[in-house]
Image: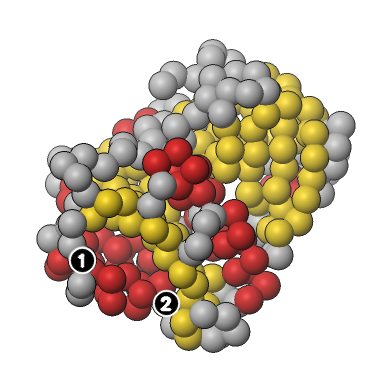
Amino acid sequence: MAAPFGRRICAVLTRSEVGAYVVLELADDCLPAQPGQFYMLAAVERWGGGDAERPFLARAISALRARGDGRIAFLLEDVGPGTARLCELVAEDRVYVVGPLGKGFVAPEDGREPLLVGGGVGIPPLAMFQERWGGRALLGFRDAHHAAGASLLTEAELATDDGSLGHHGFVTDLLDRVLAEQTDVVLYGCGPPAMLEALRVQAGRHGVPAQLCLEAPMACGFGACYGCVVATVEGYKRVCVDGPVLDAAVLV
């Protein structure tokens, strides 16, 4: 699904907090997005380090909700100056938006069940997937405060690094237990690179297909800068246009 040409200005409708995260809902009547697609976001006002400094690059943010009903929503975490600025936006603030961009998830075929595995701020594409196509969810977080984000999905099984909620350990521990009993699934993953690499290995070991939504630094979002390339068995691919969702089997 191609995004409309150029960026547009959207107003913030609501801002809410979910544990360690901020959910921004914007007014936008553009195309609905597929689960796994993303948008490039930048605040219209004060988008930079100061009068004498360069402005920030737009941030690539996966859609949490984008149904084409006049609203789109994003889950954000303050992890640096750009995301800090987005997190402090409130109702009626304005945002530059480009998207939806990239290739999203594809629904499972051959009677396989979707199994959703995510970590931290990587959960939005999985929440969007579950809303549209269902699926069992396994989610991992740093601690109970971050695990509040699991409320965006239905009946998720949880793991936390510090053991403050759910399984004490990694979400990949939960996945190993599931795949030991059931392999007629398609694995859908989104999260930090180390987690995705573990999912790639697990999917190969158990012989299950997997689609992984990758994270990568992006400057443009539509393939011009080649700043987000990843190595695959078919050569280098740009995460923004060839992904962000790629089959685990092609990743190196």
Residue at the far top: name it.
5
Task: Report whether 130 appears left or right of 61.
Answer: left
Task: Report whether 116 appears left or right of 160.
Answer: left
Label 2 residue SS: loop
> What residue is drawn where x is 24% and y is 46%?
247
Residue type pointed to by label 2:
Phe
- Residue 48, position in %: x, y? 76, 41
Q: Based on the displayed image, in which of its 4 quarters is residue 138 positioned? A: bottom left
- Residue 187, position in %: x, y? 29, 55
Q: Residues within 10 Å of mark 2 (few under 14, many from 20)?
A: many
> What residue is drawn where x is 38% and y is 66%?
194
> Can the viewer see residue 238 in this picture?
no
Q: Which residue is mark 2?
A: 170
- Residue 195, position in %: x, y? 38, 66
The answer to which of 140 and 93 lies nearer the viewer is 140
Q: Which residue is mark 1?
A: 182
Q: Are marks 1 and 2 in contact (CB under 8 Å)?
A: no
> What residue is drawn where x is 70% and y is 64%?
20
- Give the number of callouts: 2
